[in-house]
Amino acid sequence: MEKFNNLKSIPSYLSLQNIDTDMIIPKQFLKTIKRTGLGKSLFYEMRYDENGNKISDFILNKEPYNKSKILLAGKNFGCGSSREHAPWALSDFGIKSVISSSFADIFYNNCFKNGILPIKIDEKIVVELAEYCKRKEEIEISLEYQEIKYGNKVAKFELDPFKKKCLMEGLDDIALSMEKISKIDDYEKKLQNTKPWVLNNA
């Protein structure tokens, strides 16, 4: 997983509330277990018409928003089923941070495991940031200082210290386990000496 620190981008704004995981990545694209290739199907039913052609006025189909790394969203983003393909699709498209006044819990936690920073912030700030989307101006996120800079303003956000550490150091669940590999090896050696039948029957 890539390390996360500073992020600067023109944001994209989806003002819809209660965007669920089926809207983020519809069920017909869940057959793969690969994390790549899902970006083209992100928000499929909003981005494409019934013939598979891009809908020109959908924000992520427009320049420069089709290269946005920051997504502003309405409240309760990521509700619905707990599919991990949702953050996979966002990440594959290029979205590195989602800013909203509220998230569904499972989606929120899945983001950290996939290198995406979900930021919970007051709805008033989301609306202010949306103005920068309209003006096609960049905003900047500092994970280290837990702040969003826009124009001459700075908005602070709260974050769990462990989740922050994982993003800054690029640690997913596998990497966290590998950090403890020496302790796992020591335990297995001890087990081999004291209770060899446990390992031999494993």
Image (tube, helix red, strand yellow):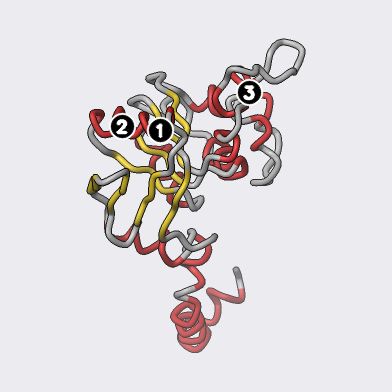
Q: Which residue is mark 1?
A: 72
Residue 36: quadrant of the picture: top right
Residue 143: image location, x then y, percent? 35, 57
Instruction: Find the distance from the CA under tag 3 to the CA under tag 2.
Output: 24 Å
Q: Are marks 2 and 1 in contact (CB under 8 Å)?
A: yes
Return the residue found at the far bottom. Answer: 193
Please determine whether, in this image, residue 73 is positioned above or below residue 5: above
Question: Left of 146 or right of it: where is 3?
Answer: right
Q: Nearer the viewer, mark 1 or mark 3?
A: 1
Label 3 or label 2, whichever comes before in sequence order:
3
* Secondary element type, mark 1: strand
Q: As rendered, which of 55 and 150 lies closer to the eye? A: 150
- Quadrant position of the C terminus in the picture: bottom right
Tag 3: amino acid: Tyr
Q: Which residue is mark 2?
A: 126
Residue 110: image location, x then y, percent? 45, 44
Tag 2: amino acid: Val
Q: Nearer the viewer, mark 3 or mark 2?
A: 2
